[in-house]
Amino acid sequence: MASHRPFLIFLMTLLVAVLCSGQFWEVEGQYCSLYWSSGQCCSDRDDECVLPIMDTFCYCDSFCARRDGDDCCPDFWEHCLGEPKRRPESDLDYVRHYGRPRG
């Protein structure tokens, strides 16, 4: 069993990484639209534009729209920017674009 331990640790780490990426992509509901008028969400980075979601927070500010956008509220793209909902960038796409891992 001890010979399988490194593989199991690797597998668990991979599973956690996959489950944590793009955390709000498939969540439905009104978040930004309950508090801000269409197209009138917060500009720049604004820690007052945060809402509870699941066991953490999501944002309705323009900072969350940076390249990965994985902490934007589910309705941010449609409600605040008038754009179709975006799927968060994968880690592989990030490496291809920036030439390095996130972090």
Image (spheres, rainbow, N blue to C red):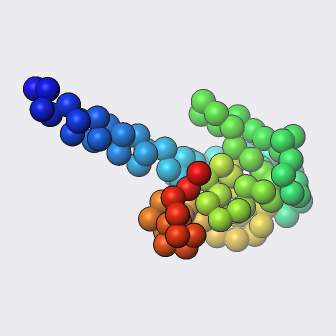
Can residue 41 be seen from the camera position used here?
no
Q: Residue at x 65, y 49 (%)?
A: 71
Q: Is residue 85 above or below residue 73?
A: below
Q: Is residue 24 above or below residue 57?
A: below
Whole-percent x and y of residue 83?
A: 70, 71
Q: Residue at x 73, y 55 (%)?
A: 64
Q: As rendered, which of 94 and 83 lies closer to the eye?
A: 94
Q: Quick check: 70 left or right of 39? A: left
Whole-percent x and y of residue 95?
A: 50, 66
Q: Quick check: 58 left or right of 101? A: right
Q: Residue at x 77, y 67 (%)?
A: 81
Q: Quadrant of the N terminus?
A: top left
Total numbered labels: 0
Q: Residue at x 44, y 65 (%)?
A: 92
Q: Quick check: 46 left or right of 95? A: right
Whole-percent x and y of residue 38?
A: 84, 61
Q: Is residue 101 above or below residue 6?
A: below
Can residue 4 be seen from the camera position used here?
yes
Quarter of the image for residue 98 reads bottom right
